[in-house]
């Protein structure tokens, strides 16, 4: 799999998600049972009913593996950047916290997602939110211009995670902070799964080992890097999630192999800071 091929497949996948209004990946709380609504999924990963009601209709697709906004301690007047903003759910929640004196920028590489997010902003009359088309490895954002960076289950999909964190460090102001939710691995996946495009766009095979992930964030220049919370990807969830079912069928994964994968995949909440 070449990097450009993977990028193309990820973009195609999320373009379909934007049009079909359904979730695609996440840890155990986000994907168990195809009958779950996006609202129920959001509540299971840490969003309150108040959060869900506050966002414009159609902004929450049940994507994500945590609630980075809740942990970011956003303050009025701050400038927030969301990496892989999708239809804008986290951006709209952040906008309410930073207020009229603050600003939120969402960046997404999928034109359909950006169009949908902009329409959601229009419907909700959000004047302090904007959405930009771009890759998180090459952010369309000025140096030293952002107070806080958030991201929700997106960096694992990047073809160059080191570059993502270097870009995040570049655009953050001194003493700026990082608060992300993402997927990591605690042990290597089987080789055939590592090479699967379907597993990559399903947020599985593109994930890093947890220690390597932490080292990558440190290497970009961040300090005080730590994991605030980690949650296992449930095997029961894998068996019932439509995306996971499709991957299992496509790759002909046996129950024995599936049992061996349990305990390998975790969602994390990670924070770091750019020193002044």
Image: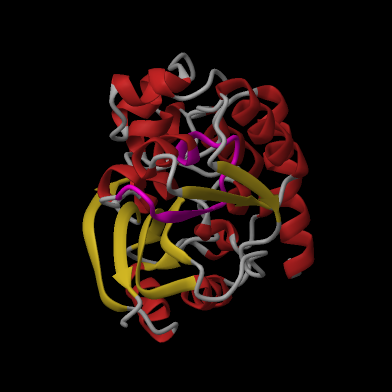
Residue at x 55% of width, y 60% of height: 206
Position of the C terminus by quadrant:
bottom left
* 83 within the magenta span: yes
Residue at x 78% of width, y 65% of height: 4
Image vertical order of residue 11 relative to residue 275, above or below:
above
Where, by quadrant of the figure, is residue 212 drawn?
bottom left
Residue ranking furthest to the front: 101
Residue at x 59% of width, y 25% of height: 22
In the image, 265 versus 154, the foreground residue is 154
Residue ranking furthest to the top: 35
Image vertical order of residue 267 relative to residue 53, above or below:
below
* 246 within the magenta span: no
Q: Position of residue 62 (x, y in %)?
A: 48, 29
Q: Which residues are magenta?
A: 75-91
Q: Position of residue 17 (x, y in %)?
A: 66, 32
In the image, 246 versus 70, the foreground residue is 70
Q: Position of residue 117 (x, y in %)?
A: 64, 34
Rendering colour mode: secondary structure
């Amino acid at each position: 799999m070449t990097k450009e091929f993977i990028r193309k497949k990820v973009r195609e996948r999320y373009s379909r998600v934007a049009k079909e209004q359904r979730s695609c990946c996440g840890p155990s709380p986000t994907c168990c049972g195809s009958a779950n609504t996006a609202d129920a999924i959001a509540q299971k990963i840490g969003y309150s009913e108040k959060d869900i009601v506050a966002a414009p209709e159609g902004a929450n697709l049940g994507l994500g593996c945590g609630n980075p906004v809740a942990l970011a301690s956003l303050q009025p007047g701050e400038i927030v950047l969301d990496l892989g903003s999708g239809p804008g759910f986290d951006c709209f929640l952040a906008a309410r916290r930073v207020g009229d004196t603050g600003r939120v920028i969402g960046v997404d590489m999928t034109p359909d997602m950006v169009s949908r997010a902009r329409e959601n902003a229009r419907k909700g009359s959000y004047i302090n939110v904007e959405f930009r088309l771009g890759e998180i490895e090459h952010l369309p954002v000025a140096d030293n211009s952002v107070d806080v960076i958030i991201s929700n289950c997106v960096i694992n999909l990047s073809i160059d995670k080191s570059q993502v964190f270097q870009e995040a460090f570049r655009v953050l102001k001194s003493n700026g902070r990082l608060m992300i939710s993402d997927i990591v691995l605690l042990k290597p996946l089987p080789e055939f799964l590592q090479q699967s495009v379907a597993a990559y766009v399903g947020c599985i095979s593109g994930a890093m080992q947890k220690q390597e992930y932490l080292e990558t964030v440190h290497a970009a220049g961040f300090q005080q890097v730590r994991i605030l919370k980690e949650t296992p990807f449930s095997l029961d969830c894998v068996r019932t999630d439509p995306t996971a079912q499709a991957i299992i069928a496509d790759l002909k994964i046996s129950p024995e192999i599936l049992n061996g994968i349990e305990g390998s995949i975790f969602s994390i909440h990670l924070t770091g800071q750019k020193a002044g």
